[in-house]
Amino acid sequence: MQTTVFIGLGQMGRRMVRRLDPATTIIYNRTEDVALQLHHDYGYQVSSNLAQDVAQAQCVITMLTDHHAVEDIGQQALYGHLAPGSTWVDMTTGDVASTRRYEAVCANREAHFVAAPVLGSLKPAEAGNLVVIAGGTPSAISGVMSILERFGRVVETKRAEQAVAVKLAMNTLLGFYMDGMAEMLKITDAAHVTRSQVLDILQMSSLDAPVMHVKRPKWESGDASAEFPIRMLAKDLGLALQFAARIGVELPVLACLESVFRQDGQSERGGQDMAFVETGRGE
């Protein structure tokens, strides 16, 4: 029986792992209470020795906060323990350059590597409706395709680093959407136009986008509970800006946007949903 080890049970990870069979999935989280709850509710086996479980797994999935967290887990249990022929799937939104290190680690272990960051938030994760951007060799991706498809629609790129670059580019556009809405609502709030009317007009226009429908209840109600926190999008915008600098691309407007999100993310509002960047709900 093939075993999958799923590492990282944050808000996304704990929903994604529910798409996998408890009978063949071992789970691990640095904060153990989340893993224990999943064990209690659904029967997932909780790892008691992560390095040993990784050494016996056919597939290892990491879904962590950033590449620094991946490095910590890697040093602890992956880099020296991946089994020959196994596949490491990193679904973290991290640094593009880090994928080269992960590929080298896997090559040294005679294992495969796939970068597979996802587009979508909590509800799509629960429903298996994420977009999975899978980068790696065709054989590596095909070997884990049946697992990736449980999370949502899979789109392939030729190289692992391309998958991460696309994810960061998409989140850059998302950041512009959120900040654009924040600034637009400042204008219409000041003009005493109701948000419901403003959003109705937006949805009638060519400016409409699906993400606007998803966030509309939050903008109307003022519910700032996080589906994707400001501080996490700030992290991704910073990574996109770093990648642009590394490849010699000047993105001055992104630099301004990243500053807005970074400052807001470092404030007491950093845990609020990205839909509330800078402007909050207004008066």
Image (cartoon, rainbow, N blue to C red):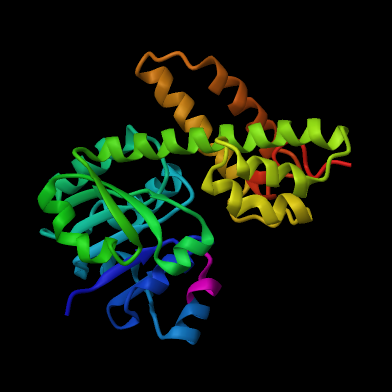
Counting from the top left corner in percent of width and height, residue 230 is at 63, 43
Q: Which image quadrant: the N terminus?
A: bottom left
Query: Is residue 38 positioned above or below 149 on the image?
Result: below
Quick check: 268 left or right of 67?
A: right
Query: Is residue 258 positioned above or below 79 on the image?
Result: above
Residue 243 visible in this rendered orientation of the protein: yes
Counting from the top left corner in percent of width and height, residue 181 is at 67, 36
Quick check: 252 left or right of 243?
A: right
Magenta span of residues: 29-35
Quick check: 229 left or right of 166?
A: right
Q: Could you say which is closer to the camera, residue 46 or residue 158?
A: 158
Quick check: 197 left or right of 124?
A: right
- Taking the spot 14% from the left edge, 45% from the top edge, the residue there is 137
Q: Is residue 34 magenta?
A: yes
- Taking the spot 14% from the left edge, 60% from the top edge, the residue there is 143
Counting from the top left corner in percent of width and height, residue 211 is at 55, 47
Counting from the top left corner in percent of width and height, residue 121 is at 51, 56
Q: Which image quadrant: the C terminus?
A: top right
Q: Is residue 199 magenta?
A: no
Q: Could you say which is closer to the camera, residue 145 or residue 192?
A: 192
Query: Is residue 94 positioned above or below 7 on the image?
Result: above
Query: Is residue 263 positioned above or below 251 on the image?
Result: below
Q: Quadrant of residue 208?
A: top right
- Taking the spot 24% from the left edge, 49% from the top edge, the residue there is 114
Residue 111 visible in this rendered orientation of the protein: no
Count of marks, rendered view: 0
- Taking the spot 53% from the left edge, 43% from the top edge, the residue there is 209
